[in-house]
Amino acid sequence: MSAPRFLSPATPYLATTYTAAPSRYDQIPFRRAGRSGLLLPCISLGLWQNFGEADPIANSRSVLRRSFDLGITHFDLANNYGPPYGAAEKTFGEIFKTDFCAYRDEMVISTKAGFDMWPGPYGEWGSRKYLIASLDQSLSRMGLDYVDIFYSHRPDPETPLEETMGALDHLVRQGKALYVGISNYSPEQTQEASRILRSMGTPCLLHQPRYNMFDRHIEEGLLDILRAEGIGCIAFSPLAQGLLTERYLEGIPSNSRAGKAGRFLKPENVTEEVLGKVRKLAAIARQRGQSLAQLAVTWILSQPQVTSVIIGASCPSQVEELQAGLSFPPLAENELQAIDHCLK
């Protein structure tokens, strides 16, 4: 019979001692989140994948520990990260309890609600009822009194924006979140959400959009709105689900996301045209002495409105690679032009 996924606090395995590396704040640069007092590391760790029930908790612990030792103080979750839904928050809560309690005031922990979480009409979207109930559940799963950032994960086409933003404001006033943000909102929705929150006295801290070399939609208006409103940008999916790595240069490995016909990257997305662009980008990376993944993150950080890039990792070495990429110089104008040319 296999051991339970989440062990009880009395289990000797959990009685471990972790001491963070004294040099952790020398390892990574920080950027200000919009017009706020909050600084975030240029790389944040997302727990979207690799922290579900099927993932070994020992590996999850290793990734979290190594990230924190490298100065990554921001950990990004959502209520439905798993699988199953809620599992990533449970995993994080177990590890936080044994490893990170002493460092709570050095950590920025975020979660979100907006996508489907439980059955029925109150288990998704942007109603006051759903958002408040969801954060209560998230705090319980993680064993926290508050999160640093709580996001509306997606706009609700049926619920008035005033209600959704009002729920975020309420949660800040309750002390359950220090800051609030939005994710996947259009430029127009972002501007209106910012106006509403500002009128309530709870400014919008961050917008979390998908952004990478193959998905540049935020350059069409959103970045301008964020700059004008004083909102930071924290980008997810920087490697385009693995396309912007060396993994697909010679085709589709059977154990890759595309090889497994995953939900977000399918074999038909990995065309010869796309791979041709990836190979050209890899050549630019090699000229700089970087890996393609490192170049992809460097490119996103060339946008001054970007506060941080959310990376995913299945092992500590992936975190180490992307953190090491921050030591390379910023992209020069001719390099940015060369990348644009590759992407045409």
Image (spheres, rainbow, N blue to C red):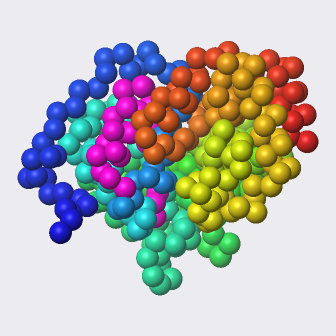
What span is in magenta? 55-81
Name the foreground residue: 224 vs 260: 260
- For residue 79, side relative to residue 192 (left or right): left
Name the foreground residue: 259 vs 7: 259
- For residue 107, side relative to residue 81 (left or right): left
Locate residue 206: give its quadrant.
top right
Most extreme residue toward the bottom is 120
What residue is at 41 percent from the left and 68 percent from the top?
84
What residue is at 17 percent from the left and 33 percent from the top?
17
**Residue 298, image x and y in percent?**
67, 28
What residue is at 68 percent from the left and 46 percent from the top?
248
Asked whether residue 138 is in view, the answer is no
- For residue 294, side relative to residue 16 (left or right): right
What residue is at 9 percent from the left and 47 percent from the top?
12
Locate residue 288: give its quadrant.
top right
Asked whether residue 251 is in view, the answer is yes
Q: Is residue 72 magenta?
A: yes
